[in-house]
Amino acid sequence: GQADLRSFFFWHPWLYLILVPAVAMRLWAEERRQGTMELLFTTAVTPVQAIAGKMVAAWAFLALALALTFPVPLTAAWLGKPDWGVVFSGYVASLLLAGAYLSVGMLTSALTRNQVISFILSVVMGLFLILAGFQPVTDLLSQWAPEWLVNGVAAFGFMPHYEAMQRGVLDVRDLLYFASVTGFMLFLTHLVLGNRSGR
C-alpha cells in the first residue's frame, strides 16, 4: 500500500559490487599492461589530472546508467504518490555509493596489471565495506566484542550511511563519509601510481 523505492535502492550496493569493479578494472591495469602509463605521464598531464579524468569519466558513465532507471520512479508516481524528497535522497546515496566503489576499483586497478585480479580485489574490498556495517555482522560482533569495536566497525562500513540517506536523511556526516572514503582511495591510488612511475 506504499509507493516508494526502498526495495529498488536496497539492491544497489549488491549490484554495484559486481558492476562497478567491472567498469574500474581496466582504468589503470590496461595502461600498465600495454605500457602506455609511462607515455601518459611523459605528457603535460599530471598524475592528479589523470586520476581525476578517469574518475570523472567512469563516474559519469555510472551516473548515466543510474539516470536511465528513471522509468522506475515514474512508475511509482503513476501507481501512487511517492515522497520525491526520499526518492531524490536515494538517488544521491546511490550515486555517492557508486563513486566510493569506483575509487576502490581504481586503487585495485592501479595495484596490478591484470584486469581479473583487479576485479577480484575490488569485489573483496567492496564486500568487506558492505559487511562491515551490515546488521547481521554487527549483531554477531556484539555477542563477543566490546561496544566501541562494534560501533567502529559499523561506522567504517557503507551500509549504515547508505541506509540513512536511502530513508531520506541527507546528513552531513554521511556525505562526509562517502567523500572521505572516495578521497582516501584516490589518494592511495595517487601514491601507488607515483611509486610505479618513479615520481
Image (spheres, rainbow, N blue to C red):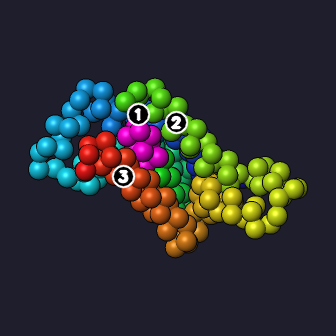
What secondary structure is the magenta-colored segment mainly? helix
Measuring from the top left, give residue 120's x and y in whole percent. Answer: 52, 31
Q: Amino acid at mark 1?
A: Thr
The crowding category of the residue bearing disc 2, from other C-alpha atoms within 10 Å (few below 14, some 14 to 19, many at least 20), is many
What element does badge 1 sit on? loop
Q: CA distance from mark 2 to mark 1?
A: 10 Å
Q: Which residue is mark 3?
A: 191
Front position in the image: 73 or 89:
89
Q: Amino acid at mark 2?
A: Leu
Q: Look at the image and tell me whether residue 67 can be seen.
A: no
Q: How many marks?
A: 3
Give the magenta-colored segment's residue range: 103-112
Disc on the earlier residue, 2 or 1? 1
Residue at 76% x, 49% y: name it. Answer: 137
Residue at 59% x, 69% y: name it. Answer: 169
Residue at 37% x, 47% y: name it. Answer: 192
Q: Which residue is mark 2?
A: 121
What element does badge 3 sit on? helix
Farthest residue toward the right? 143
Q: Which residue is mark 1?
A: 112
| 176 relative position to 124: left or right | left
